[in-house]
Image: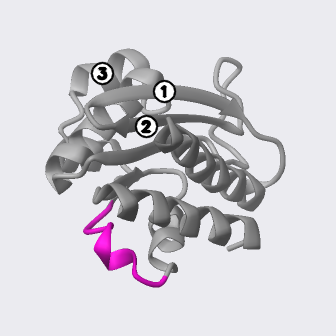
Amino acid sequence: MTEDINNLAQLLGEKLFAKNWHITCAESCTGGGIGFAITSTAGSSAWFNKGFITYSNEAKQAMLGVQQDTLVEHGAVSEQTVTEMAIGAAQQAAANVAISISGIAGPDGGTPGKPVGTVWFGFFVDGQVVTKKQQFNGDREAVRIKAIEFALSNTVKLLAN
């Protein structure tokens, strides 16, 4: 993890602790990187209970309740899927905040409509979902690190409102 990611995770924890809120994460392309960053912060057990690594479509359906129709119609890397992932994770973990992420880290798997580096994010905050799409450059590791940093940074911003 980078120093920026560690600092963001600590700031996120401070904001959650102040609100007495809990966070969870539902990760696909980052493979648990967000959960790793969060739990690298001392005291994170006060605001993090569990997370979900749902790399396959089957896992997204079984663990988070993502609808098969959503995956068939829109694909795993879509606004609709990360919305369902965020809601499902928040419900399963009884959390006030959930981060969901699904993307194409590469080096293969991209299409003209969804090139390598395309990542969708879902942010569930106190009952509301905000989604964002980003296009990151770089190799697989760079895309994953940038996605983790973006997810944490945006969650901190959303909690500041």
Please name whichever residue, 5 or 65, is drawn nearer the observer in this view of the structure. Answer: 5
Question: What span is colored magenta in the figure?
Answer: 42-51
Locate residue 43: give its quadrant.
Answer: bottom left
Quarter of the image with the N terminus is bottom right
Q: Which residue is mark 3?
A: 70
Marks 3 and 1 sit apart, C-alpha to C-alpha, by 16 Å
Q: Secondary structure at mark 3?
A: helix
Badge 1 amino acid: Thr
Is residue 50 magenta-colored? yes
Q: Secondary structure at mark 1?
A: strand
Location of residue 61 in the rendering, given as x and y in whole percent from the top left corner? 22, 40
Task: Using the rendered image of the protein, determine whether residue 61 is visible from the camera's viewpoint.
Answer: yes
| Marks 2 & 1, CB-CB < 8 Å contact | yes
Marks 2 and 3 sit apart, C-alpha to C-alpha, by 18 Å
Locate residue 104: give its quadrant.
Answer: top right
Location of residue 114 in the rendering, given as x and y in whole percent from the top left corner? 64, 25
Q: Which residue is mark 1?
A: 131
Badge 3 amino acid: Thr
Task: Please tell me how crowded label 3 is: few (under 14), some (14-19), or many (20+) other residues with Cα within 10 Å.
Answer: some
At 35% across and 38% down in the image, what residue appears? 125
Q: Which residue is mark 2?
A: 123
